[in-house]
């Protein structure tokens, strides 16, 4: 094969697989240098020996298979492109073919550099940016006028000559779109960071796709940031298809509306072609250039280079491209310019004033949390209504979030689980910049509702509103309140839907809210049944209450989690179907169905339901997280990780997505990756005690001395921010590992002062007193451990740790049958968990079976425990000192 290839080159018919053609002659072109290579082929510098001119030759890549018809189409397109006589379009001399029928394009050679190289070399001054942007748009305007679409506009396809002229190249594979019915048989998909949504989806591509690419390049030129850059190609694809562009708020103000329009997801909302866009670009540029130089030339920082962009797309561990400080610098610079331009517009351009103000506000993002509502009634039963209002108003604000990208709503379950009731704590722990507080009261048939909007960062009241209804129509009051909250936040209320509340009887809605109150504590015995009764009452009064049926389906799902009664599953499905029949646009019902299918192990059906949620609301991060858990259960960990990163991309400044990813990494035994995510949470919420405690746990699991020191520092920081049960309990265990037993007992007792219901912490206290040889304190802690773990094990029989703890405790009490039964259950649930295996070793030793104790101790080591781990257990020390312990390990599991 090597001889054949060399012979072919000698006969001026190069194969495209040749590593280099430098020094060879192809037809009447003598190749002197390789200029570059990319997805669309390899480019060489050559001398045209006939016309004695320097040209560039582009050979098409190996993976392009071209039929005779395709070649004819390409020749026609090359002729059309070569006919473009415009200073901003690279000249194409022709399309030629080697003797072995390999195509190459002959182009004029320009001395200079690509825009990609120019971006990587240094920051481009503002006036040069304006000039280049206009030139690129002019070149594409000429192409679009000739019915030619480039399809692959990107910085590497734009050459900047030594004289500063922009030349768009690589029109050789462009498509002629003079006829809408023209077939396209050759794939020219473009380059992902610059592809419009319709290109990614394989839909019809026209001039508007080039308009999208121009806008992306302009944002890079202005800000140094790519508007859709993400940690992976999957995340970037999702961002292009679903998310608003980033960094548009950093460009000079006159360009913002142009770029928002050019980056519309739907092609029909963009400029029809580059000529339309050019007119607005020239007008905006004139506004900037009319300003004095010192005002129009803002300070800018390092730009994202194409090489970095490519690296970023393939490196999921790289968190950001620009530092926080550089983003702030750019924002301040352009914000100053925007203020000046707004003032000029106010004096000279009245029509633009309103547009600029609207866009400036639209770009600001609000993180909002609804705090628990107060019951101001004399009736204590109305407290359930107040609790339900928190969930219901959160859901309505989430509908607003779905309609626009400027509002992020903290789920009510998160607010409740963190016991957040204060605006300052909401800002500190949740990152919520705005909170809603309120109260509700009922006197006879009259109902009143008050809502207060608070800036939680500055601790100031933004506004409040009071509403009353003499007929008790709380649904109507809630709708009014949410609309008023939207107005206070200056966001559109178009996402507020009254469809679910239409023709709803007042008492029905009150029952619905009470049900939500019960469902907040579905783990409390009897609460699921009470919620179901209230919801049945609601739909009996209002049979077309779709949201009532959807919530009833969720109530039955929660009931199943508690009682495992198959009839609850059937009832959940039945009510969800009724909700869909009444209103197929309720995301919550598909979330419930997804969770139901997942619980039944029907992963494909679960994924379908979560996908339906995303079809209704592409910004639903919770649906992505739900899909991730299903993927993880299916063993598709790469897909799970990708979905979690996509959820983070939706809310990059909200910590909850990072926590879900950190917990995923923890389950996958990727401790260092989990640490990075917890550190990101701390960056977002620097006063978050839970984040520090979680970070400490990750360091604790690494186990080396340096990590243990880091863990202690994290736990101490958590306690310093807010004394909490988790941090005290965790640092208590850390002190046991470091043989600081008195400090362990002291810290663990502080944890129990905050929560004395966790058997695991009582067990740790028992262990600390065992090492301290304080028999009285040890026995008291042991008695409490046994009582609590028996209660817990009865309700949670599938918890292997509880089962193995019971086996140890019963073995110590010489209750052999019970000890062995619980040991068997623990091993059935987690046969390879090293901690469980060590527990069973203790059980067997206390029951007098030393041989089996040795076998389980060895198995514990084989599955990840260390000798140091076993030595933390005083009951095993006699076994570890046994001469048989150093013998061969069993070859088979017991």
Image: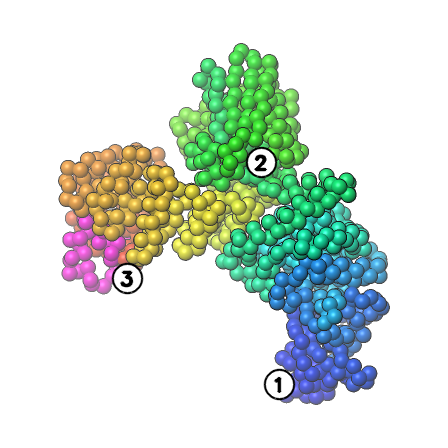
Kindly state the secondary structure of the residue where label 2 is placed.
Answer: helix
Q: Is residue 847 above or below residue 316?
A: above
The alpha-carbon separation of the residues under discs 3 and 2 comes to: 56 Å
Circle number at residue 166? none
| Of the image marks 1 and 3, the number of the one nearer the N terminus | 1
Question: Split into 4 quadrants, where in the image is the N terminus?
Answer: bottom right
User: What whole-number distance in Å separates the C-alpha atoms at marks 2 and 1?
Assistant: 65 Å
Any part of residue 609 in sight: no
Which percent across, then down, holds residue 683? Answer: 46, 48
Q: Are marks 2 and 1 in contact (CB under 8 Å)?
A: no
The residue wearing badge 2 is 398
Nearest to the observer: residue 322 or residue 234: 322
Mark 2 or 1, nearer chain start: 1
Q: Residues within 10 Å of mark 3 (few under 14, many from 20)?
A: few
User: Where residue 650 sits in the image (x, y, percent)?
Assistant: 57, 46
Find residue 772 and report its horizontal and vertical position in percent. 17, 45
Dot 3: element: loop
The residue sitting at 38% across, 41% down in the picture is 721
Comparing 640 with 400, the one in front is 400
Q: In front: mark 2 or mark 1?
A: 2
Q: In the rendered image of this protein, does residue 92 appear above or below residue 475?
A: below
Marks 1/3: CA–CA distance: 54 Å
Q: Residue at x 67, y 76 (%)?
A: 35
Residue that carries the numbered disc 1 in the rendered image = 2
**Range of residues picked out in magenta:** 867-894
Image quadrant in which you'd find residue 94: bottom right
Q: Nearer the viewer, mark 1 or mark 3?
A: 1
């Amino acid at each position: 094969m090597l001889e054949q290839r060399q012979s072919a080159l000698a006969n001026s018919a190069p194969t495209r697989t040749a590593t280099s053609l430098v020094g060879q002659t192809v037809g009447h072109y003598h190749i002197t240098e390789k200029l570059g290579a990319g997805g669309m082929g390899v480019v060489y510098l050559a001398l045209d020996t006939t016309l004695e001119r320097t040209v560039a030759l582009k050979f098409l890549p190996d993976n392009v298979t071209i039929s005779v018809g395709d070649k004819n189409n390409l020749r026609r397109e090359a002729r059309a492109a070569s006919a473009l006589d415009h200073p901003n379009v690279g000249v194409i001399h022709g399309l030629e073919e080697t003797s072995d029928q390999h195509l190459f394009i002959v182009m004029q050679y320009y001395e200079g550099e690509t825009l990609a190289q120019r971006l990587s070399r240094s920051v481009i001054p503002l006036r040069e940016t304006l000039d280049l942007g206009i030139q690129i748009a002019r070149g594409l305007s000429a192409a679009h006028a000739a019915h030619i679409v480039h399809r692959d506009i990107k910085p590497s396809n734009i050459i900047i000559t030594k004289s500063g002229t922009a030349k768009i190249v690589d029109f050789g594979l462009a498509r002629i779109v003079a006829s809408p019915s023209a077939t396209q048989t050759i794939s020219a998909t473009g380059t992902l960071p610059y592809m419009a949504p319709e290109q990614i989806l394989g839909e019809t591509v026209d001039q508007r796709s080039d308009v999208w690419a121009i806008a992306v390049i302009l944002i890079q030129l202005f800000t140094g940031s790519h508007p859709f850059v993400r940690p992976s190609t999957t995340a970037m694809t999702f961002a292009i298809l679903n998310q608003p562009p980033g960094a548009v708020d950093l460009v000079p103000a006159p360009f913002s509306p142009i770029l928002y329009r050019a980056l519309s997801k739907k092609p029909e909302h963009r400029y029809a072609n580059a000529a339309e866009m050019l007119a607005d670009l020239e007008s905006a540029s004139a506004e900037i250039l009319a300003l004095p130089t010192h005002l129009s030339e803002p300070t800018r920082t390092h730009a994202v280079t194409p090489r970095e962009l490519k690296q970023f797309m393939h490196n999921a561990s790289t968190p950001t491209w620009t530092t926080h400080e550089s983003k702030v610098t750019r924002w301040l610079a352009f914000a100053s310019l925007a203020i000046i331009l707004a003032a000029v517009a106010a004096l000279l351009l009245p029509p633009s004033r309103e547009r600029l103000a609207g866009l400036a506000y639209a770009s600001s993002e609000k993180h909002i949390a609804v705090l628990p509502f107060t019951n101001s009634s004399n009736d204590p039963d109305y407290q359930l209504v107040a609790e339900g209002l928190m969930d219901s108003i959160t859901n309505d604000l989430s509908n607003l979030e779905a309609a626009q990208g400027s509002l992020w709503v903290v789920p009510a379950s998160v607010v409740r689980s963190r016991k957040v009731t204060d605006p300052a704590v909401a800002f500190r722990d949740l990152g919520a910049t705005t909170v809603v507080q309120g109260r509700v009261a009922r006197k006879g048939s009259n109902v009143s509702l008050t809502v207060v909007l608070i800036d939680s960062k500055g601790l100031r009241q933004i506004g409040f509103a009071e509403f009353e209804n003499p007929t008790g129509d709380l649904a109507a009051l809630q709708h009014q309140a949410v609309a008023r909250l939207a107005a206070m936040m200056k966001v559109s209320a178009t996402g507020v839907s009254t469809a679910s509340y239409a023709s709803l009887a007042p008492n029905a809605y009150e029952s619905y809210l009470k049900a939500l109150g019960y469902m907040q504590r579905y783990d409390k015995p009897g609460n699921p049944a009470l919620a179901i009764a209230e919801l049945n009452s609601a739909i009996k009064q209002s049979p077309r209450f779709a949201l009532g049926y959807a919530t009833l389906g969720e109530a039955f799902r929660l009931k199943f989690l508690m009682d495992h009664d198959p009839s609850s599953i059937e009832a959940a499905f039945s009510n969800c179907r009724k909700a869909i029949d009444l209103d197929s646009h309720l995301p919550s019902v598909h979330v419930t169905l997804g969770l139901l299918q997942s619980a039944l192990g029907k992963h494909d059906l679960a994924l379908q339901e979560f996908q339906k949620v995303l079809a209704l609301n592409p910004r639903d991060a919770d649906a992505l997280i739900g899909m991730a858990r299903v993927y993880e259960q299916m063993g598709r960990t790469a897909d799970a990780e990708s979905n979690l990163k996509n959820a983070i991309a939706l809310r990059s400044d909200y910590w909850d997505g990072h926590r879900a990813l950190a917990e995923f990494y923890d389950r996958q035994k990727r401790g260092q990756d989990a640490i990075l995510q917890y550190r990101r949470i701390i960056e977002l919420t620097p006063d978050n005690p839970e984040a520090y405690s979680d970070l400490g746990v990750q360091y604790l699991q690494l186990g080396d001395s340096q990590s243990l020191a880091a863990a202690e520092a994290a736990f101490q920081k958590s306690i310093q921010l807010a004394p909490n049960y988790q941090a005290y309990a965790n640092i208590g265990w850390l002190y046991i590992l470091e043989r600081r037993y008195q400090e362990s007992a002291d810290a663990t007792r502080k944890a129990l002062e905050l929560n004395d219901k966790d058997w695991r912490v009582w067990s740790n206290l028992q262990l600390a007193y065992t090492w301290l040889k304080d028999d009285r304190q040890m026995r008291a802690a042991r008695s409490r451990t046994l009582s609590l773990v028996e209660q817990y094990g009865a309700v949670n029989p599938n918890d292997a740790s509880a089962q193995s703890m019971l086996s140890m405790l019963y073995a110590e009490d010489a209750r052999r049958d019970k000890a062995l039964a619980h040991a068997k259950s623990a091993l059935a649930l987690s046969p390879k968990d090293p901690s469980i295996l060590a527990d069973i070793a203790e059980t067997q030793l206390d029951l007098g079976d030393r041989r089996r104790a040795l076998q389980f101790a060895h198995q514990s080591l084989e599955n990840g425990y260390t000798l140091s781990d076993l030595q933390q257990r005083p009951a095993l020390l006699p076994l570890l000192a046994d001469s048989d312990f150093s013998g061969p390990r069993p070859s088979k599991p017991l």
